[in-house]
Image: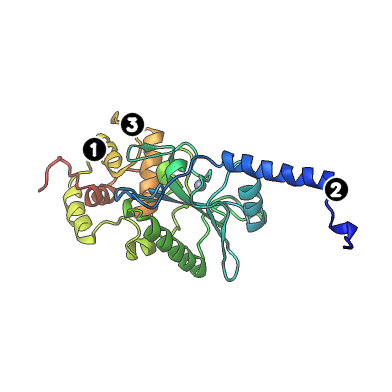
Amino acid sequence: MQIDPTQRRPLGAWLKWCGLLLSAWLLGGCAGPRIDSTTHRAVSHDSRAQFLILHYTAVDLESSIRILTQQRVSSHYLVTDEQPPRIYRLVDEDRRAWHAGISAWDGHAMLNGNSIGIEIVNLGNAPGPDGREAAFQPYPPEQVELIVELVRDIVKRHQIRPDRVLGHSDIAPQRKVDPGPLFPWKRLADEGLVLWPKQADVQQAQARYAAGVPPVQWFQQALAKHGFLVAQHGELDEPTRRVIAAFQMKYRQAKYDGQPDAETAALLTALTGLWHPAKAP
Ligand SMILES: [Zn+2]
């Protein structure tokens, strides 16, 4: 019988083959214990993503992509400002993106661990390179519609509550103002995606507060009940003003001066149920 020498395995080849077998066995060993994940399944669990945080990037698209993909900051999604706008997923939802930083809401701290972050390409309120004055930039309608679609999808899949769809300025009001006073919160609220006060409740409370604006202590109490991390000392200091301004940027976008006034008090009452004095009329 003629044997084709190319079919014969020299000793070296056999050793190589045995080595491969050994590595496969070892790798198999490293994969961990055998786990049965189908026989018994628990009914009690929810998504690790409890919050959805919205941002603007404050820089153009090219810089946004570079910073969010190559520096020590990231987000799960980036919504561009192109025509038409696009959505990029930069980090998988089961991974932690680094977008929130030092942050707090409603007793939860450091929200990177339990949130999904969306960055939106929008120049924010930085002065433009062309000498444009610092002014918040509008979100184009097409971009808004895409944001609504994305938020709706994430909220539905992770069952995120409307009071937990927030801006960076909500969870870090001392450091951040994004997504800013031109962000379409009302549009998201109309879809049931964001907590929003009933107009009748606001009017009723505002009529009552017209006679006298509640004291700063009450504002601090109501803002804390709403979810903000805010000191309860009764003084209208800069940190308190920044928290009030953050609240106004979302719920009373025409005026966000950080001043406690009757309309702001009425919005807080309508959202929290907290009256001044602390009883229902
Ligand atoms: Zn941000």
Answer with left or right where residue 178 lies relative to residue 268.
right
Query: Which residue is outermost to the top?
Result: 233
Residue 2: give x, y in percent of width and height: 89, 63
Amino acid residing under circle 3 = Ala
For residue 16, above or below residue 240: below
Please name the residue shown 62% across and 42% down the image: 25
Nearer-the-camera pick, 170 or 267? 170
Considering only order in the chain, which callout, 2 or 3, is on the residue closer to the N terminus? 2
Answer with left or right where residue 89 lies relative to residue 102.
right
Real-space Cα separation, disc 3 to disc 1, in angstroms: 11 Å
Helix, strand or loop at mark 1: helix
Visible residue check, residue 258? no
Amino acid residing under circle 1 = Trp
Circle 3 or circle 1, nearest the eye: 3
Please name the residue shown 60% across and 51% down the image: 127
Determine which of the numbered discs, if any, sits on residue 231 in the image. Answer: 3
How dense is the environment of label 2, judged by Cα within 10 Å: few (below 14), some, or many (20 and up)? few
Cβ of mark 3 under 8 Å from ligand 1: the answer is no
Amino acid residing under circle 2 = Pro
Disc 2: which residue? 10
Please name the residue shown 28% across and 46% down the image: 261
Disc 1: which residue? 218
Residue 59: give x, y in percent of width and height: 61, 52
Dot 3 and dot 1 residues touching (CB under 8 Å): no
Answer with left or right where residue 116 lies relative to residue 189.
right
Visible residue check, residue 199? yes
Answer with left or right where residue 34 lies relative to residue 236.
right
